[in-house]
Amino acid sequence: MANSFMKIPGINFKHIRTSITLVTSLLIFLIFVSFGFITYNLNQVLIKGTISTIHKEITNKVLVKLDVYLDTPYTVNNLTDAFLRINPEHLKDLDLLRKYLYKQLSIFNNVNLIAFGTKKGDYVEAQRLEDGRIRTGVTNNSYLELWKTDTTGQKIILEKMIQSYDPRLRPWYINSKNKRIPAWSDIYLYSSNNKPAISANQPYFFNSNTLDGVITTSITLDGISKFLSELTLDNNSSVLILEPSSLAIATSEEIPLLDKLNKRITGSNLENRLFSSISKFFQLSIENNYTNIISDFSMVIDNTKYLIRSTPFYGPYGLRWNILVIIPEADYMSVFYRASTFGMLIFLIFMSITFISSFFIAGQIAKPIVQLSTLVSRITLEKDNISKLTIPKKILTRNDEIGTLAESFSNMNTELGSVFLYLKKSQKDYKELVENINSIIMRVTPDGTIIYCNPFGLKFYGYKKDELIGSTVQDTVLKTNDPGNFDILEKIFKKDQKYWNGINKNITTDGKEVWILWANTLIYNQNGTIKELLSIGQDFTSKKDAESKLNASLEEKNILLKEVHHRVKNNLQIITSLINLQLADISNGIIQETLESLQSRIQSMSLVHEMLYSTDSLTQIDFHEYLNQIIATISATFNNIKNPVQVTLTGDVLYLDIERSTTCGLIINEIIINAFKHAFVGQDNCKIDITLNKDNSELISIIVRDNGIGVSSLSKTDNTQGMGSLLIDALTDQIGGKILISKTKGTSVNLTFKN
């Protein structure tokens, strides 16, 4: 019987099976191709995003390292300046200053030379030789004597004498004298090891505007290449630092930066082909003024594609370099290429299985379709009344499944009449609602063609019905300057969700740009494909403008808050400088000691605001780093060169808010100063150990131990409590903390409080 059905004219079993097989295979093929295309582009976007993230990470690390590396010389200069102001008599006895410079060079391992030249032509220095040994020098009757020095700074052997040495004739002295402000020198070759170096020069004024001398601190630039090579070990990237003149400063590779005549060379003359090629492009960028902004570009060198990011570095006191981070694209694309090859093999296997399965399944589906088509071909529809179907009586009286199906058609015919009446009424109600609602209602096909827009929408956009209907949204309401609008429909139709809400920019016929809040619904055909998009929109322009103003206001407040911290730091530094000036006019030792303690407290508070201004966070600072700076300041102010106190800081890294950081900093400041003043009277090998601990319950413990003679004035029960002790008690109560004091083998102070 099946064969008789299949022989009915116009119905061919083989054609139907072939069509179903081809359509099914084609759909699956298109889905796989589309999925592969989307995956390919998505992976490329992700890989480029990964490379961009690596660019940013390496650049940020280089910028931070450079800031720290280049800030050291000016820190040394400031400490030398403070030493001279606290001990102005050292200008008369340069040997004491020589020992101090030796101590500073021993502490700051990145520094190669510290020197001071006076307006009278006297000169004192401490320099690090190529073998790491420190040699000191001082002028004596116009001769510069260079001495081999022991670990305490004492002269041992006179190694060299330079006749008629006058620092006032040196470029660093003349440069600083003319500018009268701190400034960097040009890069030069350091005489001890013939490596590129740079010096920070700072004029010294004691009590007037008359120059009393110049302080200079030099560092070599080989340390920059060292940390650049460490940054690039894990990701095969390279880093090149150039001056705007295109002279090479440092690289992440061990290649010479000098030519055979020991002169500096430009990046285009480097022995590394990668760096030389990129440097030539960099020189062209200078001509086009592209080096003043962060710029990304790519180059193909020796059949390898490299992605490069150029970032300007603006150092302190006018320093200007460019950092180029270079990443080979192939290192990140190779895994993707292997995955694509494997995916193609799987795809071919799957398509073969799919074709065979589709051919078999299509045969099973085609047979009942042919039989049902024979039955339906005998049913006619009246043209004027779609609800009436004429079904032959002999089909209705069948006792098999087809008869049951025919009877179902008959019952359905009766119900269709009622349904069509209800649909006509619903259509009328829907039309009235859509045409009178104060919202934009629009229907759009997947290619962007507008097939309906309600009267409110036509009036809102300023179009007539025949102008908008039949056109595309890309050529009308989405034709703004926003590039994201051109693929917005594609993004909506790709979403898995049936409903999607979003905001985008539209344009009216008079050129006005408006923001619309859309509620979108995807309408599907019976086969599951998307038929059209139904969109309901509300004018969101005023709210979008308010949101933009609010974001701008928040950004402005963050900038103002950083500026407040910066100004507070500057004001506190002015107070510190005023105290320095006052100290020079006071001969009373007690008053001097009081002012020095007050100065140290102010400096500890100033450091908090400086760190908040220098970091992205406006609420927390690195307390470990903060204590390091307090220790360095106190050591430079109160340390005895002949019997120095060694201060060490160990323990956990802590981040505290500004209130607790300031309070704890003042407490530790008082404890350390108290130890410097009273704990080591007549004692050698002086040590202070500071330990930071934090347990799981957020309980923070700061322990300060010294090996001195013991200090009693920190106790609350001591009737001889001074200002510092009273301040410690008050500040400890302020943060709800506790202080325990132990006097076994020196003094141990344990400060605990909740974070």
Image (spheres, helix red, strand yellow):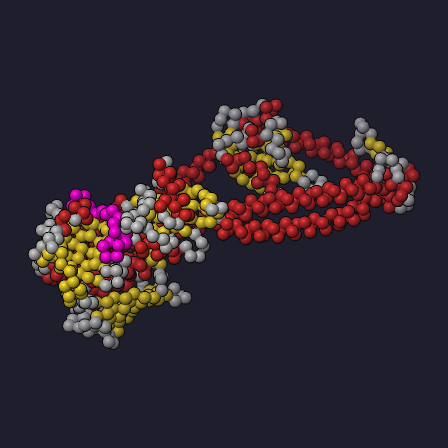
**Image position of 468 (left or right of 401):** left
Q: What is the quadrant of the N terminus in the image? A: top right
Q: Quadrant of residue 381?
A: top right
Q: Closest to the observer: 435 or 343?
A: 343
Q: Closest to the observer: 164 or 61?
A: 164
Q: Closest to the observer: 121 or 655?
A: 121
**Image position of 593 (left or right of 400):** left
User: Residue 193: x, y in percent?
Assistant: 26, 57
Residue for point 34% across, 66% down? 651
Q: Is residue 240 above or below residue 384?
A: below
Q: Does the magenta stretch include residue 744?
A: no
Residue 410 shows in this picture: no
Give the extent of the magenta segment. Answer: 176-198
Q: In which quarter of the image is residue 690?
A: bottom left
Q: Is residue 214 above or below residue 551?
A: below
User: Residue 641: x, y in percent?
Assistant: 17, 65
Q: Closest to the observer: 417 or 236?
A: 236
Q: In this view, does 579 lie above or below 638?
A: above
User: Residue 603: x, y in percent?
Assistant: 23, 56
Residue for point 23% across, 47% down? 185
Residue 440 shows in this picture: yes
Q: Does the magenta stretch include residue 195?
A: yes
